[in-house]
Amino acid sequence: MDMRNEIMFCVGLVVVMVIISAIRKKYGKIGAYDERQMEVRLKASAMAYKAALALILANGFVYVFSGKKFSLMDPYNTAVLCICVSVLVFAAKCIENDAYIGLNINAKKYSMLLFAVGALNIVSSAADKNIISFVTNGVIMYISPQLMLGILFLLVAVMITTRKDKDGER
Amino acid sequence: MMKNLKLKAARAALDMSQQELADKIGVSRQTINAIEKGDYNPTIKLCLAICKELNKTLDELFWE
């Protein structure tokens, strides 16, 4: 039995845990936010939840109203995509209001880390034989999860680095 | 919400930047900026921390 995906998943998990513990050791608690940031993050969470719900409903409506002949994606891809979209919505709202990165975290270094993780995911997705496969009835049967996550990390990193401090100190 | 010019003036009187004040009370610079611009309504806990740092009373900084 081919266990490559499962092994890679576990390796990825260990790598993430090592990175997080290294950041914690150097900078302290990652999730240190002030009260305004917490408020923004709460609103962003609600927005992310609604975005995920909208995506699931859209897929469901297309399936039902096409007489169960057509759906945008299969359930597995919908789930992964929903997670990615909701994380992206959450990140966008938080970054816009300076509430994404904790008080004691260096934004530049953090975005570089996200770039690296994104690039690593995209590179590893190339090893997947079927990065994207469209099958009958136009249903997307498979998108490499690494590809989706890689794009997600890159987008978040780009948003952090390109955000301009529109209300700089006067 | 109205701009909090009293807070800005009190901070400027001590020759303190938004970043310096933010660091002293453990919030982000953007939070101080949002309070001064009137975009964010701080909790009483944060108001007290700001007052203590700027040697002012709640009335002096936050009463309209």
Image: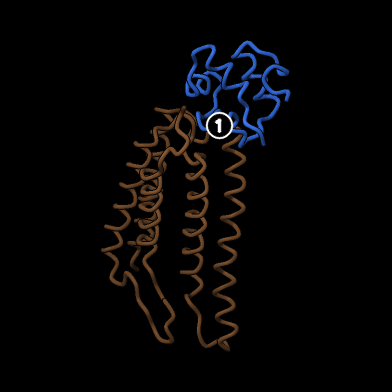
Residue A79, compared with residue B5, is above or below; it is: below
Give the image quarter of residue B62: top right
Q: Position of residue B46 (x, y in %)?
A: 64, 25
Q: Position of residue A170 (x, y in %)?
A: 47, 27
Given the image, what chain letter belongs to the residue carrying mark 1?
B
Give amino acid for label 1. Answer: Thr
Residue drawn at 37 percent across, 47 percent down: A157
Q: Quadrant of the N terminus of chain A?
A: bottom left
Left or right of residue A38, residue A162 in this image: left
In the rendered structure, the colour chosen for chain A is brown
Residue drawn at 59 percent across, 78 percent down: A61
Depth order, front residue of A121/B30:
B30
Residue A15, compared with residue A86, is above or below; it is: above
User: Residue at label 1?
Assistant: B31
Q: Which chain is blue?
A: B
Q: Position of residue A4 (x, y in %)?
A: 32, 61
